[in-house]
Amino acid sequence: GDSVTQMEGPVTLSEEAFLTINCTYTATGYPSLFWYVQYPGEGLQLLLKATKADDKGSNKGFEATYRKETTSFHLEKGSVQVSDSAVYFCALVDSGYALNFGKGTSLLVTP
Amino acid sequence: NAGVTQTPKFRVLKTGQSMTLLCAQDMNHEYMYWYRQDPGMGLRLIHYSVGEGTTAKGEVPDGYNVSRLKKQNFLLGLESAAPSQTSVYFCASRSSGAGDGSNQPQHFGDGTRLSIL
């Protein structure tokens, strides 16, 4: 079945460092891909999405490009802030119209 | 903007007790979902609904039942709680959108933290 694999955390970075969180997927066809973010004590919020190959999703300085050649959707940000500390989830839509999530990557940004 | 509202936010149960978690959305969304979140496991789908009066099983449905009697509400029931059901439960909803709607984002509630002793 369809699945998502993302890099395990925790990831600790200094403020203004460059961030990459790797995400690869296995799927039949070309599902829509998402990144969600979860701040402590809260539910998940959509960060960005891409619906077809070569699409780039972007929001709040974060970017991810849908790469069908490498079946990847890596999340990047050029300069992280302390407020970006959260858990990040990569996800795809499976055939049952639900989201299939990766296990999440915890990010801690220190001043 | 209420969005997706889950009640209660916290609950402690004893093994064998029953309870119902309520999810309400005010966005007129067709699709609703229940997930559980456990450390190191990400989110796993319990049950979902594609419209009023319909429900379907997800990845981990055993021990849970659901009902969607009204479009805006999606109830998750535990008939006989077990310690393995200790988790954080999230409800989500999304619109049907164009086509199969698979590019529509899901909107999440803030979760219910449930402990079974």
Image (cartoon, coloured by chain):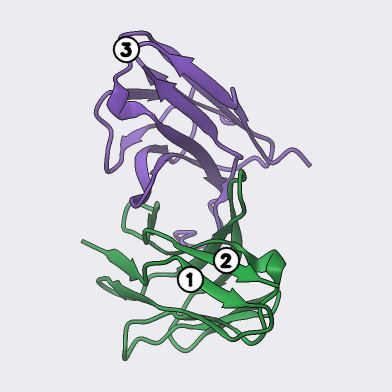
Chain colours: A green, B purple
Where is mark 3, residue-wise? B15
Left of A26 or right of it: where is B4? Answer: right
Q: Nearer the viewer, residue B97 or A19?
A: A19
Tell which residue pokes out farthest to the right in this image: B1
> Chain ID for label 2?
A
Q: Is residue B5 above or below residue A84?
A: above
Where is mark 2, residue-wise? A108
Which residue is at a point 57% across and 66% down the rendered structure image? A108
- Image location of residue B71, percent across then percent down: 56, 30
Which residue is at a point 59% across and 81% down the rendered structure image? A63
Distance Cα–Cα, label 2 vs label 3: 36 Å
- Image location of residue A8, percent across then percent down: 37, 67
Secondary element at tag 3? loop
Q: Quadrant of the N terminus of chain A?
A: bottom left
Distance Cα–Cα, label 2 vs label 1: 6 Å
CB atoms of marks 2 and 1 within 8 Å? yes
- Image location of residue B66, percent across then percent down: 39, 25
Residue B59 occupies quadrant: top left
Where is mark 1, residue-wise? A11
Left of B82 or right of it: where is A84? Answer: right
Q: Nearer the viewer, residue A18 or B19?
A: A18
Residue A14 occupies quadrant: bottom right
Secondary element at tag 2? strand
Disc 2 crowd, CA 10 A, few/some/many (<14, 14-19, 20+): many
Q: Nearer the viewer, mark 2 or mark 3?
A: 2
